[in-house]
Image (tube, rainbow, N blue to C red):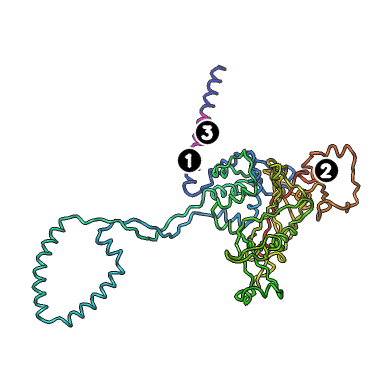
Amino acid sequence: GKSCESWESGLNKLWDGAVRAVEESVAAERCLEEMDAGNHYSIEEQLFDTIPRGGDAYSSSSTTYAGLVNLGNTCYLNAQLQCAYHVPLLRKLIMDARDELVEVEVEVEVEVNDDEAADEKNEANNQDAANASNAETAEMKEIADEGKIEQSTQDDAASTADESEATTAHDLEEPRKKTIIKTEIRNELRSISPALRALQHTFNSLSPSSSRSASSGTTHTLCRTLGINPFIQQDGQEFWKLFIPEVDYSKMSDLYSGYFEDYVREIIAIDSEEEEKKDDSHSENSTPRERVRVEPFLDLSIPVSEGVGSVESTLRDMFTKPEILKVSEGNGWRPSKDSDKVDAYKGSSLKMDGLPSLLQLHLKRFKYDWETGETSKINDCCTFPLELDLSDIAEADDRINTSDAIYDLQSIVIHQGEYGAGHYYSYIRPDIRTNDWFRFDDQIVTPVDYSEVVSDAYGGRVRRREAQGSCGSGSNTNGRKRQRGILRRIFSIGRSGSGSVGGFGYGGRSSSAYMLQYVRRSEIPRLYLE
């Protein structure tokens, strides 16, 4: 009896398994039908739901921001994508991108009879020739007499008979063909780039939907599409400059695109003896000779000085303090091939109308030593403001409002470690109207105070969170007693992530800002879809 019962139980289990398999097959077919009907993300979303999620257990339950899973060494990619994703207009442009039907001019090869090809090629010339022929015919009629016309009529009758026989023979021959090129207007489907389509998938994985809450997104499809090896780390800034052109989406690149001018400008000595010696043609015109070259950019690379520096002072030196080329010192500038060298200014000029909507500043923290052939990281302090005012740095004409030169800090990409190795993560202010900051360290998202941001981002050998506007130099403004015990100093060596030990931030003594992203204040309503 027991053996029969176990045998019957086994049959029931097999039957239940078969039923479940059929039900799953039917469900899969329905998903395929939904995708064919236009829901391109239905199956991908279901597959994505099976990916293990990350997230910070200590984050507030009200936080809905999603992290990005590190596929190996893709932290550099995760940090940059998070900065872009949290600009609402940019996110919307990426998600709304679709294939477009556009009118284009195309050249096509058409096979026609030789006579037709000649007619089409010389259509305009034939029209002119016809007009001239009509005028000549009228003139001939005036000077012709009746005898000549009668003789011509007899000759025409004879020639008509010969032409009739020739035409009959010609009709038996096949007409000669000729290929010509014609321009036509056609409607073509212009597809978005594979990189943009993959970026849409990544942004979709970061966006909460009705079926799931945001937790952790993935760049798997993006890496596979671009051929990125997820186990090889790249420089975050170099990757982003190559990634934007690869996406090939003007609405995205336009937000980052700006320009400045490199120039060499002659120094004119006013009321000097040298001015009188110049040739008459030039002395009549006091405008200095110059050579200007426009330099487009997606980000501005600014050097980090060893010691203590700031973004504002570095930008001011770059764009308002040109180098002086003096003939007396063996330099000078030759305006033209046959002219003499003259003293000149050599520098760069930042134009107000060349400022982008999203201003990315690349802090050049890696230097190459020509003597040793080694590259090292400059981890010295470089401060940056929450509000960046470029009105006294960028040149503007009367038509441009100087308020367009004010930018608000939106995100920071941090590099932790030394050259050739390390880790990237980012600090982001999703709502630019508030001072609420979050740290996006791959799939872990944590709310932080701005004091924690600057202690981690400024760099420097000594940092204190309470000295927010400096690099940690000076006295302790809180009057809090500093502990300098030998054991405390020993155990603080190499320790990171605590945000408190030794005054260093989350990334420890080797962390510092590598990329800064600012948004133009006058464009905040547009960029944040207000």
Q: Quadrant of the C terminus?
A: bottom right
Decide if residue 524 is in sight here.
no
Label number found at residue 209: none
Disc 2 element: helix
Q: In the rendered image of this protein, does residue 315 appear above or below residue 222? A: below
* Prevailing secondary structure class for the magenta stretch in the rendered image: helix
Q: Which residues are magenta?
A: 15-28
Q: Which residue is mark 3?
A: 20
**From what the image shows, is residue 311 above or below residue 24?**
below
Residue 142, how many percent across, how many down? 18, 83
Residue at screen point 66% across, 56% down: 300
Query: According to the image, label 2 marks what residue?
Result: 501
Q: Say if mark 2 contacts mark 3, CB within 8 Å.
A: no
Q: Which residue is mark 1?
A: 29
Q: Nearer the viewer, mark 2 or mark 1?
A: 2
Could you tell me if the residues under marks 1 and 3 are in contact, i.e. CB atoms within 8 Å? Answer: no
